[in-house]
Image (cartoon, grey):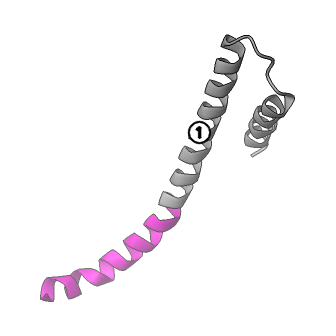
Amino acid sequence: MNSLSDLSPVLIPIIALMIPIVSVIAIVVLKIVRMQLLHETIRQISASGQTVPSELLNEIVNTKASLNNR
């Protein structure tokens, strides 16, 4: 138990710095997965010969535009 109290001055700042880093990584991963799912959906729709809804295409264009503006 004494070693935990010795490490707490070091662990608290490390954990405090890790929280925003992990949050940013999680947001980026979720955006990437979402874009992959959108692309896969469009690929399957076009492979089956259906017309791709303009909402899906607009969503991809808007998402990529917002990523390029950052």
Amino acid on which the number 1 mark rests in the picture: Ile
Q: Say whether residue 40 is magenta.
A: no
Front-lying residue, 49 or 66: 49
**Position of 21 compared to 7: left or right?**
right
Image location of residue 24, percent across then percent down = 56, 56
- Residue visible at 64% across and 35% down in the picture: 35
Q: Give the range drawn in magenta.
A: 1-21
Front-lying residue, 55 or 63: 55
**Disc 1 marks which residue?**
32
Image location of residue 23, percent across then percent down = 53, 60
When asked about the image quadrant of residue 43, the answer is top right
- Residue visible at 65% across and 27% down in the picture: 41
Compared to residue 65, the image places residue 19 above or below, namely below
Image location of residue 64, percent across then percent down = 75, 35
- Residue visible at 66% across and 12% down in the picture: 47
Q: Say whether residue 7 is magenta.
A: yes
When asked about the image quadrant of residue 45, the answer is top right
Mark 1 residue element:
helix
- Residue visible at 70% across and 23% down in the picture: 42
Image location of residue 32, percent across then percent down = 59, 39
Compared to residue 35, the image places residue 45 above or below, namely above
**Position of 68 compared to 43: left or right?**
right
Front-lying residue, 60 or 3: 60
Magenta span: helix, strand or loop, mainly? helix
